[in-house]
Amino acid sequence: MTTEQLENVVIRFTGDSGDGMQLTGTEFTKTSAIAGNDLATFPDFPAEIRAPAGTLAGVSGFQIHFSSNAVFTPGDAVDVLVAMNPAALKSNLADLKEDGVLILNSEGFNKRNLERVNYDKDPRQDSSLSKYRVFDVDITGMTLKAIEELKLNQRSAVRCKNFFALGLVYWMFNRDPKHTIEWVEKKFAKQETIKNANIYALKAGYAFGETSEVFTHNYIVKKADIPKGRYRNISGNEALALGMMAAAELSGLELFLGSYPITPASDVLHYLSRQKKFGVKTFQAEDEIAAISAAIGASFCGSLAATTTSGPGLVLKGEALGLANMLELPLLVIDIQRGGPSTGLPTKTEQADLMLALHGRNGESPLPIVAAKGPGDCFYAAIEAARIAVTHMTPVILLSDGYIANGAEPWPIPSMQDIPKIDVQFRTEVEGFQPYLRDPKTLARPWAIPGVPGLEHRVGGLEKQDVTGTVSYDPQNHEHMIKTRAAKVAAVADSLPPTEVDGDLEGDLLIVGWGSSHGAIEAALPALRSNNKKVGHIGLRYLNPLPKDLKEICGRYQNVLVPELNMGQLSKHLQTELGLKVAEYHKVQGKPFRVIEIIEAAKRVLEAN
C-alpha cells in the first residue's frame, strides 16, 4: 500500500436521483472542510422531477474540488468518478481524466440498466475503459451483507449503498468518518434501525478499502493555507438568506420575504422561513405576482422587503416591478437564473436574464442591478443591494444563478461590527412634507410610513406629479418624471466603490466577467499571466449603472474579453453604454465555465492581435 500526497483532487459521485449522491457529496464536503481543505462544490440535479430509474435523464451528480491550495471552481476534469449504474457512467465518463480512478457499483451494471442507456456491450468487459483505473466493486451486495442483521426491507437496505461508497472514498483520502457518524446519529436519532444501517454501511465501505487489498494507493491532501478564523460551509442560497438578515440588522428594519417556490430559488424561502426567532417574516404566496405585491406592501409599511425567484418568475413579476419603480419604494428582487427560455433547464445554470433585468418592464423603467460572484459573496451582494435600495428608494435586482445557488465553499464568518451600518431615514416631520420631494444628492423621495398623522399620501401605478405625488397626465411632467427616475438610478454610480482589478492593471488583455464566471476566470489568470502576457480580471458587481471608472480601466488594455453563459448580453450592454469594443465568448449548455475554456478563449484573443 502506497500513500501519496496530492494538492488538488476532484471527485464526482453519480447515480440515480434517489441514490443519495447529493447527501454523499455533502457529507464528504463537510468532512473535507473540517480537515482544513479549501474547496468548491457543484451539485448537478436532474431537470425532471422523477425521471425513470436507470436513464440518462435521471442521473444525479455531486462534484467536489478540494485542495491544499486556494480553490476557485469545482474543477475541470475529474480525478475520481463513482458511478452507481451505466447511466451515471455514460453521462459522466467524458469528464474523467485519463488514468483517473473509476469506481463502479457492479450490481448496477445489469442487463436492464445497460439496455436503458443503449450499451450494446457491458463497458466493463470491452476495452472502452482501458485508459482508466477501474475498480468494479459490489457496493450494493456488500452493503446488504453489512446490514443484514438489522432485517431492513430490501428497498430501505439498498438505499444505504451511498454510505458504503462514502466510507470507501473516506478511506481512499484518509478522511475520518466520525463527523458523518455523528451527523447520522443526530439525523436518525428516532429511527434506530435506519441510523445503524447507515453507520454499518459507512464503516463497511471504509473497512473494505482498508482490508481488501484491491486498492494499491490511498491519498493525503493537506490543510490549505487559509487565513485563521471561524469558517462554515455555505451555499449561495444560504448566504443570500443570511445576507438579507444581516441587511435587516444593519438597517434596523424588519425583514419580509414574499416568495413563490421555484427552482433554484426555493431554498432561500425555506431557510428564511425557519428564522422567525430573528423577526424574519416569510410569506409563501399563491403565485409570483402575489409574492412581489406582498413585498411591495411590506416595503410601503417600512420593512426591508424582498422577493426571490428565477427567470420565469421574474417575467411574471414584471408588472408589479414596474409598480414598485413608480412608487419609488425599496425592494430586493433576487433572480437566481436558470437555463431558459420557458421552463427550459430548471436545475441547470445560465446567465441569460441580464437583458430581462435591464429592460423586462413596460415603459421606461430602469433599475439598479447587482450580481453575486460566488456562494459566499452572495452574503455581501445582498447587503449591497439592500443599501442601494433603501438609500435611493428604488427596487434593486440581484442576479445570482443556479451554479452559485447550489454550490458551496468555506466561508469566513464575518463580524457584524465590521460591516458598515445601512442608514435609513424615515420621514417623521410633518411640516414641509411632500411625498415626492427629493434628496438633491440621491434623488430619493422620503420614506413615509402609513399611519403617521400629517404624512398621508397616495401611491399607485398612475404617473405622479413631481413633488406632490398627485396623479398627473401632464405630458411635460411625465417626461420629467421619467428622466428623474432614470437620473436617480444613474446617481447610484456616485456611491460605488472603485472597481477592483485582479492581475495586471494594464496590458494585453482584460477579462470582464460577472456572476458565476468569476471563479473560472480567477483560476485561469495565473496561467495566462505566466506566458509573458499582462492580463487583468474584473468581476463586475454593478451591472446597472455601470461603474464610472470602468471605461477608463478597459482602455488600459489592448483587448477586452467578456465570457458569459449566454449569447453576449453583458457584451452588448458594455458596447451600448460605454461604446466598448469587446471580444465575446459564449457558452449556453446549462453548465458553468471550465477554467481551460477561459484560458483557450483568452489565448485566441491574444493570438489574433
Image (spheres, rainbow, N blue to C red):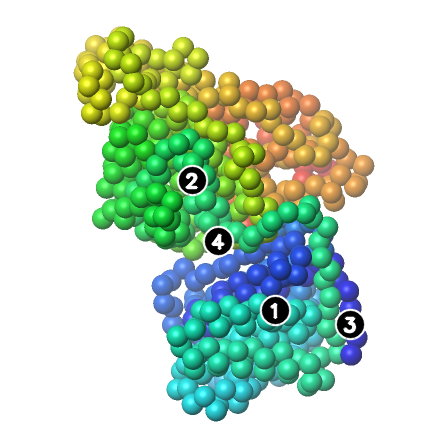
**At which x and y percent is residue 227?**
69, 46
What residue is rendered at 54% in x and 72% in y? 181
CA–CA distance between discs 2 and 1? 37 Å
The reply to whether residue 496 is in sight is yes
Q: Is residue 266 above or below residue 508?
A: below
* Three-letter amino acid code at the position of disc 4: Asn
* Pointer 1 residue: 81
Residue 202 vs residue 463: left or right? right
Q: How would you rate the neighbour count of disc 4 (Cα within 10 Å): few for under 14, some for 14-19, many for 20 or more?
A: many
**Which of these two is toward me, 234 or 593?**
234
User: What is the three-letter code of the residue carrying label 2?
Assistant: Met
The crowd level at tag 3 (other Cα within 10 Å; few <14, some 14-19, many 20+) is: few
What residue sits right under mark 3 in the picture?
3
Q: Earlier in the sequence, mark 2 or mark 3?
A: 3
Secondary structure of the residue carrying numbered label 2? helix
Query: Residue 273 versus residue 47: which sits nearer the camera?
Result: 273
**Circle nearer the N terminus (2, 4):** 2
Q: Give the Cα separation between the discs numbered 2 and 4.
A: 18 Å
Q: CA distance from mark 3 to mark 4?
A: 33 Å
Mark nearer the N terminus (3 vs 4): 3
Q: Which mark is residue 244?
A: 2
The answer to whether the residues at label 1 and label 4 have Cβ atoms under 8 Å apart is no
Res 329 → quadrant: top left
Give x and y (percent) for residue 578. Answer: 54, 21
**Residue on which the image places disc 4:** 406
Are discs 2 and 1 less than 8 Å apart at CB?
Answer: no
Residue type marked 3: Thr
Return the disc, 1 or 4, that comes first in the chain's sequence: 1
Specify the amino acid type for callout 1.
Leu
Closer to the eye: label 2 or 3 = 2
Q: Residue 129, image x and y in percent?
A: 65, 75
Q: Earlier in the sequence, mark 2 or mark 1?
A: 1
